[in-house]
Image: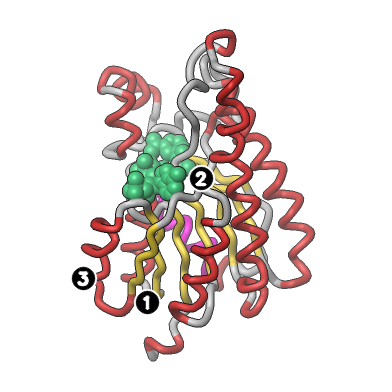
Amino acid sequence: MDIEQAPAMLVLGGTGSIGGEIARQALAAGWRVVVQGRSAEKLAALETQHGGRLVGIAGDIGRPGEVERVVAEAAQAFGRIDAAVDCVSTGAPGILGRFTETDPAAYARHAELSIVHFQRFARAVLPWLARNGGTLIAFISDAGIFAAPNQTMIGAMRAATIGFVRNLALEVSREAVRVHAVSPSYVAESASAQRMGSSRMEKAAHRAGLGLPTAADIAPLVLFLCGDGARKITGQVISVNGGLNA
Ligand SMILES: NC(=O)c1ccc[n+]([C@@H]2O[C@H](COP(=O)([O-])OP(=O)(O)OC[C@H]3O[C@@H](n4cnc5c(N)ncnc54)[C@H](OP(=O)(O)O)[C@@H]3O)[C@@H](O)[C@H]2O)c1
């Protein structure tokens, strides 16, 4: 395919473990990619590595107006956005652990970093996706689907995102836009895995009959959902967890 005609994917959090792998696999599959992250250095390194097919945009989506600016600049980069994937890691300090020990002062910030930025992302990017019939994907986590202790605040916001995704999917289907949520649980070799520590990861790996996925096992699902083969699928919440939860 002529590179000028190639579809364009915007990956928020594209300098992270999962977003980075999605960007790599999308480039290998012929997409042009715009990657957002906070680190200008990481983005510059990616641009050098991938030439004109990858554009990096630095921005902190926790700041007012930033999501909208990133979408506007991404659209300018290639003149189109055919897929928009949100892989920004979410959560404010003070929301992890037993609910009674979480910090009420952090709840609004957590909502902003968890679901509100995705709603603002959706609002900004939908007109672009509607031009060619594109796909919007939220990354959530299994805490939004399967109950577990110490994840009350995370699970609540992830569940809210699921409700948003499924309702929006029906609303925008007549514009040929598809909307999904992809749900990891424990992801081997990711930054979160490092944060969680080896003993928790080992226990999870023991429970996952298929073995814990890596980012490389998650990215193909995203490419499928954004591709023509998934043109009749929308509003789905798909967990990639190696058999940990069903
Ligand atoms: N990995 C797991 O085990 C796991 C499990 C369940 C769910 N998930 C979900 O899957 C998604 C991707 O996870 P991941 O493991 O790839 O995360 P990650 O490696 O921590 O990457 C996070 C990405 O988000 C960006 N980011 C973080 N805060 C930001 C902010 N305020 N503004 C702009 N960008 C920001 C980071 O940019 P910088 O590079 O500049 O820091 C990075 O690109 C997240 O929603 C995560 O919650 C992951």
Extreme-top residue of the structure: 100
Q: Which comes sooner in the sequence, label 2 or label 1? A: 1
Residue picked out by circle 1: 30
Which quadrant of the figure has residue 104? top right
Mark 1 vs ligand 1: CB below 8 Å: no
Mark 2 vs ligand 1: CB below 8 Å: yes
Q: Quadrant of the C terminus?
A: top right
Secondary structure of the residue carrying tag 2 is loop
In terms of secondary structure, what is the magenta stretch mainly? helix
Residue at point 58%, 13% (across, down): 99
Are the residues at dot 3 and dot 1 in contact (C-beta closer than 8 Å)? no
**Alpha-carbon span between mark 2 and mark 3:** 27 Å
Secondary structure of the residue carrying tag 1 is loop
Residue 112 drawn at (x, y percent): 59, 40
Q: Quadrant of the N terminus?
A: bottom left
Residue 48: mark in rendering = 3
Total labels drawn:
3
The magenta-colored residue range is 217-227
Residue picked out by circle 2: 62
| Residue sitting nearer the eye, 28 or 119 | 119
Q: Which comes sooner in the sequence, label 3 or label 1? A: 1
The residue type indicated by label 3 comes to Thr
Left or right, 48 with respect to 33, comes to left
The residue type indicated by label 1 comes to Gly
The residue type indicated by label 2 comes to Gly
